[in-house]
Amino acid sequence: MRVGVEIPIDHGSLPKRFDSCLSLCLGGKRIAGSTPVASLLDHPIADDDNDAINAAYRARLLAQDWGLYRTLQLNTARVRQTAKELPVASETIEQRLDQLCERTEAQPKSLTWRLRTCVGDRRSWYELPEEVRQPYQAE
């Protein structure tokens, strides 16, 4: 799957600011949303990368790319539902997701973002691979 944003990665590893963003984007495919749930439980919301989810970075990233924003918006609902079904502090998850959403909505959006939101879901914002191969399947 291709999303229309290029992510700058420093020092060859994903910072926590992007780790939660990516896991939400992918829908936490390990155990139906448990990856983003674990990230949200383990790391507070802040404006830096000091063992926290960087809300400022995430908001800037999502304000530049409507497709990434929409994918995270859809998967956030799935994560909220998963948190209710797991034996975890779902109130903490809800609170942190609310903080992230508030920061994202408050961030000024680019002109291309605002134009793309007019089209909405009528036009696909992602590309599916031509051939889907199961993990670990021999080529």
Image (cartoon, rainbow, N blue to C red):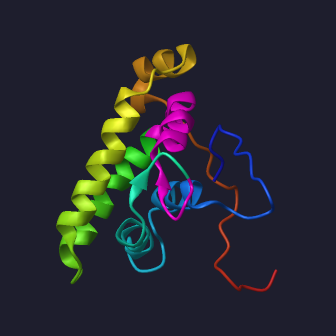
Residue 68 position within the rendered picture, expressed as x and y whole percent measured from the top left = 52, 41
Asked whether 68 falls inside the magenta stretch, the response is yes
With 2 as the anchor, is 81 left or right in this view?
A: left
Quadrant of res 14: bottom right
Q: Is residue 84 or residue 122 the one in the foreground?
A: 84
Quadrant of res 37: bottom left
The secondary structure making up most of the magenta span is helix
The residue sitting at 55% across, 42% down in the picture is 57
Q: Is residue 47 or residue 135 the one in the foreground?
A: 47
With 58 as the anchor, is 80 left or right in this view?
A: left
**Does residue 55 lie above or below 14 as drawn?**
above
With 42 as the anchor, is 98 left or right in this view?
A: left
With 80 as the anchor, is 11 left or right in this view?
A: right
The residue sitting at 45% across, 45% down in the picture is 55
Q: How many marks?
A: 0
Q: Is residue 124 or residue 131 the one in the foreground?
A: 124
Residue 17 position within the rendered picture, expressed as x and y whole percent measured from the top left = 55, 54
The residue sitting at 43% across, 50% down in the picture is 46
Q: Can residue 124 be seen here?
A: no
Residue 92 position within the rendered picture, expressed as x and y whole percent measured from the top left = 23, 65
The C terminus: image quadrant: bottom right
The residue sitting at 58% across, 55% down in the picture is 18
Task: Give the magenta part as a residue range.
Answer: 49-69
**Does residue 12 lie above or below 34 as drawn?**
above
Q: Can residue 11 be seen here?
A: yes
Asked whether 6 falls inside the magenta stretch, the response is no
Residue 2 position within the rendered picture, expressed as x and y whole percent measured from the top left = 66, 48
